[in-house]
Amino acid sequence: MVAFGKKLKETQIQEWQGYYINYKLMKKKVKQYVQQIEVSEQSREYVLKDFSRVLDKQIEKIVLFLLEQQGKLASTLSMLGQEHDVLIQQQDGSKLSQLQQSYVEVGRELLRLLVFVEMNAIGVRKILKKFDKRCEHKFTNYYVKTRANHPYSQLRQIFKHVGIIAVVGTISRNLADLQDNRASYISIYDQPALPLPDPIIEAINKAVDRLTNSTDFLHYLGKHALILPQELPTPSEDHAAAERYHLMSLLLNLANAFLYMVNTYIIVPTADDYSLSLGAAATVCGAVIGSMAVAQVFSSVYFSAWSNKSYMKPLIFSSIVLLIGNTLYALAYDFNSIYILLIGRLFCGLGSARAVNRRYISDCVPLHLRMKASAGFVSASALGMACGPAVACLLQTNFKFMKITFNQDTLPGWIMALAWFLYLLCVWTSFREPAKEEMVNVLPQKANSAQIENGLLQNGISQPLLLSAEEKQQDEDEDEDCDNSEESAEEIQKPVTSIVSAYKLLTPSVKVQLLIYFMLKYAMEILLAESSVVTTYYFIWSTSNVAIFLACLGLTVLPVNILVGSYLSNMFEERQVLLASEILVCLGIVLSFQVIIPYSVPQYVCSALITFVAAEVLEGVNLNLLSRVMSSRLSKGTYNGGLLSTEAGTLARVFADSTITLAGYWGTSRLLNVTLLPSLFICIFSIIATCFTYNSLY
């Protein structure tokens, strides 16, 4: 049976060559149709019918081949099942191990078949997009609508996975029986959630999810961390990650993410009062809040580079710097110095170890726990965002101890300094640093982990869907935002070595998505950072009222993500949700303006809620899309996808806080409208950019 898999692998490329969608033929057809339409407008209807017929034939060829291959896999599994029954009786350990490998090999063939379907789906999408562009007709809408729900549609058959799920079930059951080279008498039906599912099964399930666009809350939330996964790691890589894995270290890593977000937002309700007490304008709160983001722009890079060699040392350094920063922030009141206040916040930004948090999850958490750990990272950050203002609400006191003032302005600094001191002790005593030689091998292992799936592309399976370099140059209409599969095999293995190299890997659609991320972070920072000044000026809210309002906004993060991850993302295309969310953010910003009528609490609360919730939906969907379309080379190294998204969001916060500070020169009465204008322009620009790249957002 092992020989069967090896033989199939050798002959597969030649045998499957003729079953891919014929991209060159379809491209020539499109050119012919363009010429016909130019000659006679009456031929348009004929063109649509003829192109539909040709495309139907191509899809039918794919579907019939898919059914044929499923039949071959089913036949192989039937033969393996008979061999399985015989070997269980004999209890021959070596042969049982070979049989286990045979089942894994069948799983690999199934995964190759799924990649075959996915590559053809990409080819169909590109053909439809090319036809719409060249023939100036929305053929895609017509074709999908007429084929999506018809009972005999071949297009529907691609997305029905009854046969595939049956094959996966057979492989899973038999691999569970053969685990540890012995027969198991406990059925997988009695234990439906296997503690250590085989990597091949996880890879197949992910491939099926990609084809059906199905998702759940855990995977949806986990992708917000933008820890770009390799689809099928080698057993050695997953084994190495399992050896590096340490539960307490992971929890301390997540605690760092939680405390940092608390540290970021705990000062927001009192930043304006603190600035006034030091003799500065209330709008200087923008500089106080934003100075942390300015430092984070630089700290993200050196922490990301440091994480190539160590995890414990960066976390210790981060804790010390944050301890110093918060102490300076608290002491600024007694020194009556706005400069000490700003330096303290700069130190807090220099201690941002979120790049280390992401990297630890990516490198030191086994595959079967990685998505849960990623979701934990996002949840910890969201919880910290809500807890920061809530804690500030509780610090309404005023006393002196040893000539040091403790009040609502300084207590956030003292509380966070104490928290980071305790965290430092926990890291020092409980965090386990992975062995040095294992750390050195992280990058090579990560590179090798993509070889199995990327090997499909390297071996030329994707060739029928892609054009050669010469053909690309000849075709001016060919999309520049092609898939990562167009990267050379050698380049795929190498992490990028500079921010410039990373930028060159960004396709136009990815750049638009980073722009969207910048826009939503800018809008959210404007809303949150100026909330204390705006509500005090218009509604005379106390610090407690502002803190409760911000905490309630923060608590909407997880419920909103549950709604989108479990329901909306399965009911609508993510690009549809993306565009709708952008429009809602724009609506929220428009409603926030103070115009002729007096500004009221209901107007402010409703507009803020619309802006914040829509931005949260937008962030989730946008990062979910980014995790799928970013280059695989950005999944590792210093300049990874997580760092790029962090830098985009951090720069947005810097510009937003700078806008608030600069707007203060026009007076508090004009602050709201002056700061909302840039948000509105950036939002409108991002909507226009999204519309231009809408067909590329998959």
Image (tube, helix red, strand yellow):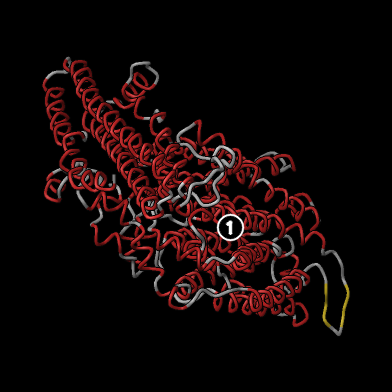
Q: Measured from the top left, where is residue 309 in percent x and y?
A: 45, 76
Residue kind at label 1, given as amino acid type: Phe
Where residue 614 sits, quadrant-wise, is top right
Camera-nearest residue between 267 and 497: 497
Asked if residue 301 can be seen in this view, the reply is yes
- In the rendered view, does 185 fall on the left or right side of 283? left
Give left or right: position of 52 versus 561: left
The C terminus lies in which quarter of the figure?
top left
462 above or below 246?
above
Residue designated by label 1: 377
Residue 332 appears left or right of 467: right
State which quarter of the image contains the N terminus. Answer: top left
**Who is closer to the viewer here, 233 or 424?**
233
The one of 378 and 302 positioned closer to us in this rendering:
378
Reply above or below: 686 against 332: above
In the image, residue 532 above or below residue 321 = above
Quarter of the figure with residue 697 = top left
Residue 507: percent from left, percent from top: 32, 52
Q: Of all residues shown, which one is farthest toward the front?
A: 90
Residue drawn where x is 41% and y is 62% of the image = 237
Q: Locate residue 365 relative to residue 644 in the image: left or right.
A: right
Q: Is residue 462 visible?
A: no
- Vertical placement of 127 versus 232: above or below? above
Regarding mark 1 in the picture, which secondary structure is present there? helix
Image spot of residue 389 (x, y percent):
73, 58
Percent coordinates x, y for residue 225 in the rendering:
52, 55
